[in-house]
Amino acid sequence: MIGAARIVATLAWRNLWRNHRRTLIMLAATTIAVWAMIFMTALMRGMVNDMVRDGVESLPGHVQVHHPAFRDDPSIGNTIPISDADIIAAFEAGGFAAWSSRINVPAMITSERETRGVTLFGIDPALDRNLTFVADGIVDGRFLVDADDKGLLVGRKLVETLETALGKRVVLMSQDPDNEIVDRGFRIVGVFEANLESQEETMVFAGKATVRNLLGVGDRVTEIAILGDDYRDVEPVYRKVVDLLDAESGAGDVEILRWTELNTYLGTMLKVMDGFVLIWTVVIFLALSFGLVNTLVMAVFERVREIGLMLALGMRPISVMSQVVLESLMLLAIGLALGTAIAWATIVPLEDGIDLSIVAEGMEFFGAATVLYPELTVFDVALANIVVLTLGFFASLSPAWRASRYEPMEAITKL
Amino acid sequence: MSTVRCIDLCKTYRQGEQDIKALDHVDLEIDKGGFVCLSAPSGGGKTTLLNAIGGLDIPDSGEVWIDGQRIDTLSKGRLAKLRLSKIGFVFQAYNLIPVLTARENVEFVMQIQGVPPAERGQRSSAILEEVGLAGLEDRRPAEMSGGQQQRVAVARAIVSQPALVLADEPTANLDSRTADDLMGLFVALNRHHETTFVIATHDQRVMAYAKRLIKMLDGRIIDDIRQQAA
Amino acid sequence: MSITLRLAWRNLWRHPRRTWLTMGAMVFSNVLLVFMITLQIGMYGLMIENTLKVLTGHMQVQAKGYKDDMKMRQVVPDIRALSAKLRDALGLETVSARASAFALASSEERSFGIQVLGVEPRYEPLVSSLPGLVKAGRFLADIDAAEIVVGSVLARNLRIRVGDEITLLGSGRDGSFAAAIATVAGIFESGVTELDRSIAQVPLVFFQDVFFMDGAGHQIVLTATDLALVGAQQAAVAELLPDGDGLTVYDWDALQPGLRQAIQADISSAFFMYAILVILVAFSVLNTQLMSVLERTREFGIVMALGVSPGRLGRLVMLETGLMGLLGLLAGASLGALFTYYFTVNGFSYPGMDEMAKAFNLPAEFYPRVTLLTLTLGPLAVFVFALLSAVYPALRLHWLHPVEAMRAA
């Protein structure tokens, strides 16, 4: 058996290089196809991952906890029914990558010139530093010092529209739980940049305690945001948060959501992406398979006589079949190796990011940032390889079967 | 026990509109160690008979026995096995697998049989030397002359010491000197190994080597001559 | 049928399996291309229409810079008169003036920051889909009534119903404090949460009074008779604008640059996919035609010895490829049209599409329409590349030496 397998492999390999022109054309096609599969997938993955990362960052967190009514009605009336002290005590012990309890309410921001609607965040800088992009995004001024900080962080774009500047005062207006309009002047102490312009336009940050005083809500928060280790595997964090809150008294009435539920567009995107990668890989393979089968049919046709000879000498039909299938798989394997290598070689130099700022607003329309970081994953490379080899195997069966069914004598005498 | 025994073989082909009787009630028995020439004009049925004996073609009716085993009723797989162990073939031309070297062509059958590499090497070297191809073991068919190619084919046919070697026009593509050399080789092998040879040919000089000459016409045996071999 | 054509046709069918397989590659790619291009172009059209018809319109007259900064003082003076003038001069009803401000909207119980639009009740429904989406109450009627139409999410969050009152607090054009009370006339529901949460409309004159606009507004929204006519009508509008007020007219592309860029970004990734499909077909054809030429070396040698020029033989090879390509084109385009037509009737959708579609103002189910362009674009590209890939095999004939060729096995 081993002898037969060896001779089959030898024959397949040598036959592959008999018509080197044809083999090279087919190899080039396979290489391009494999490259296209992996390269395109890496670009798409990169884009979706950027979107998801930015999205998760601006949520922020992989899991969020709110009052059940808060998401539909983001009012300070809908705070989480647990004191912040209890929340901090519980979550500090949770061992999360990062987490924060915060207040976020709709507010109006007014400069001397202009008025805009924004979301006001009351944050504890110590907690939020690792959670939001804001700490790293400060381009002018400083980040907040502590929860009692009286300063305000404003996005670069909003500073422009309000015609204000670092160090100037703006007024924030919102409502307290009794629906009384409350307002307070803030000095802009920091200006931040974000990946998406909409974030720069609609988010402002102040100290948690300062915002609490303004709104008169005591020891309450509207949102707990928790960051896990990997956004793709959010379940462990989710379970832990559920367990933590189950232990809290009076916590029956909170809504705990994963980011895929918080931003269903992104959640769907990630799922659709997996489907897309598979469809794209299969479609490309199918386009390639016509050429592959064609090549095999030709190869078998040219070798009718020697196949007949092998059968006449006592080679089993299954061995003849394996020989053709193996030849095809060898061709595909080389194409896969080359295609994967070239894909790697073309993606690695691009991993610092592809600048798409010419279509920046278009990318924002998709919810994506302007620098695209292609992402080459082992999974996608493996998928391309498995799809090509598996489908290649099935595509080769028909010509191989025909070869093994030749009548030895007819084949030998055929001219 | 005879090596080959054919009983009442019939085989009809359709060619265009016509039915051609390639074998018409053929009875034949060949003893062990025989050296038989089948001679017939083109279309006389000699190739068909040879193929029936080699299990490459199934007759319409009748029986074929090789070494006491009936073969016309065997499955394809069993036939392949039988050919592997009992029968060696030498064809008219295109006898070798183009991508394999002389040695690999000779070892081909042994490799399928699962003979261990060391033994394979030994046997192929010995047999290649015997057919006069020492030093050419690593050449591919395209790098050898027609006579050398046929010698490789003969070496392959006899390397697994089959009871029977079937040769179909083995000299058709050879010049007369090379053909003589090849027939000399057949005779020597027949003598040393007691291998039975059945050779289909219409070459007069080949027939001269035969101990027994069977003439066919229109699918029937018309003459069966025992003669003194040259 | 000329002898060359007949010869080409017969040569094509010497290896029927090979020809079928090569054509199969063409047909496969063509069907995919027809379907994908039709889907894509159709979706772009819908995406543009649906995005623009909400608020943007096809063109807007604004003070220069307003679209980027949206500042209260970047105004179009005497906006109703200019709007009327444009309507008359263009003979176009679909012209409506707007003013816009950010304000805090408060009910008895709640307050939220929103964008308040002052609109012309008579003309707004002609340029925007929002008035048609009023689900409770009615749209605005009088141009100076203290009425307001709000989005459904905002209404829910403010806990108000039709007939309730809303207080608006904001800054006027000059930066001074502006406040007003308006009665809720209607509630619209667009299905886009952002809009339903953050937009309210009031009559233009009422808006001008509240925010001290002094007859001015911010945008005149125009909808052209057809998206394709925007360019011409934009020029006509530009002619009609008064000098010296710093006014300009932007087309939808300037107003929503994201839209065209999103389409461009999508087109380039789609183009990459199409190119790969076409290239793979080209390789298939190259392989087939090269084999077909190589195996006929002997035959070509004979006819060349008889005096047939290599150029002529080259043309024969090209003709064979052309015939094969034509068959692939016809079969591919027909099958592609049929395949796409199935979705024209039954609608096209994939799991997760409703969620994605919402983000691009698209319906959850899509009914693609095959047009001549979408039908022929892909298959023609495949045809051209098939021909190009046969050039090398055809050129090889020039290097053929008759005597050597005849000796070839």
Image (cartoon, coloured by chain):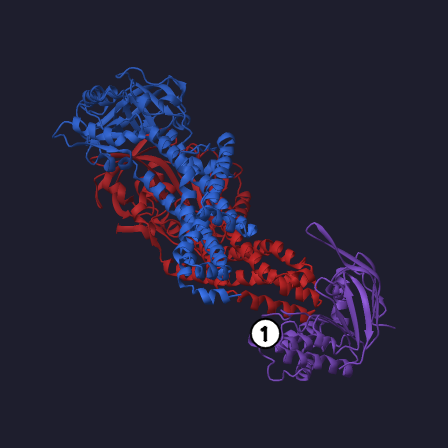
Chain colours: A red, B purple, C blue
Q: Left or right: where does residue A169 sit relative to residue B176?
A: left
Q: Left or right: where does residue A171 sit relative to residue C262?
A: left
In the image as oriented, which residue stretches furthest toward the right? B1
Residue A273 visible in the current orientation: no
SS at circle 1: helix
Q: Is residue C185 above or below residue B127?
A: above
Residue placed most toward the observer, A301 or C80: A301
Q: Is residue C127 above or below residue B165?
A: above
Residue placed most toward the observer, B34 or B161: B34
Which residue is at 88% across, 73% downward? B1
Disc 1 marks which amino acid? Pro
Which chain letter goes with mark 1?
B
Q: Left or right: where does residue B224 sit relative to residue A342?
A: right
Residue placed most toward the observer, A101 or C198: C198
Total number of numbered discs in the rendering: 1
Residue C181 falls in which quadrant of the image?
top left
Residue C220 visible in the current orientation: yes
Q: Is residue A112 above or below residue A195?
A: above
**Residue B97 at what x, y percent from top left?**
62, 70
Residue placed most toward the observer, A352 or C239: C239
**Residue A277 at what x, y percent from top left?**
49, 49
* Crowd rating for badge 1 (residues with CA inside 10 Å; few <14, some 14–19, many 20+): many
In the image as oriented, which residue stretches furthest toward the left? C244
Which residue is at 38% across, 56% downward? C311
**Residue A161 at what x, y percent from top left?**
24, 39
Q: Which residue is mark 1?
A: B141
Residue C96 falls in which quadrant of the image?
top left
**Residue C121 at what x, y percent from top left?**
30, 19
Residue A330 falls in which quadrant of the image?
bottom right
